[in-house]
Amino acid sequence: MTSASAPRHHTMYAEFTAQPGNEGRLADLVREFAVLVRAEPGNVAFSPFQKREKPAEFFVYEEYVDSVAFREHLAADYGIRFNEALSELIIGDGSELTFLQPL
């Protein structure tokens, strides 16, 4: 069991779908971004996946030491540039985030 005073990790996953023909460009963009995010001091995990049966669909598991680290991640200049580039390659307005809590 975890202590009530122990910091809680901020955990989520993001999902997004490439516009037709942009699967390779999107995969490259996410790979490059992953290197930068994994170097963040508050990052615990950044694991991107491309769905095997539906290669246009992407899934990224993310975990940060706490909500402050996640906010710092969102404020990083390279994250802002990533999201701008992402919006041009995917269907919809942005990635769909699902926040998780431990049981």
Image: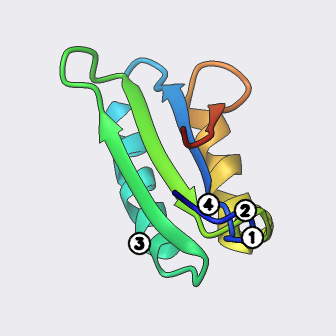
Q: At label 2, which amino acid type do we have? A: Ala
Q: CA distance from mark 2 to mark 4?
A: 13 Å
View extreme (left): residue: 52
Q: Are marks 1 and 2 in contact (CB under 8 Å)?
A: yes
The mark closer to the camera, 2 or 4, is 2
Foreground mark, 3 or 4, reads 4
Q: Which comes sooner in the sequence, label 3 or label 4?
A: 4
Task: Estimate the spatial distance between the alpha carbons at disc 2 and disc 3, rounded to whole Å.
Answer: 32 Å
What residue is at 45 percent from the left and 73 percent from the top?
38
Residue located 45% across and 42% down the image? 60
Name the kind of residue labelled 1 in the image: Ser
Whether residue 22 is visible here, answered yes or no, is no
Residue 9's label in the rendered image is 4
Q: Residues within 10 Å of mark 2 (few under 14, many from 20)?
A: few
Mark 2 secondary-structure assignment:
loop
The residue where tag 2 is placed is 4
Q: Nearer the viewer, mark 2 or mark 3?
A: 2
> Alpha-carbon distance for marks 3 and 1?
31 Å
Report the mark closest to the observer, 3 or 1.
1
Q: Measured from the top left, where is residue 8 in percent x and y?
A: 66, 61
Residue 32 seen anywhere in this rendered image of the structure? yes
Inter-mark Cα distance, 1 to 2: 4 Å
How dense is the environment of label 1, judged by Cα within 10 Å: few (below 14), some, or many (20 and up)?
Answer: few
In this view, 32 is above or below 38: above
Task: Using the image, tell me which numbered label, if any, was put on residue 35.
Answer: 3
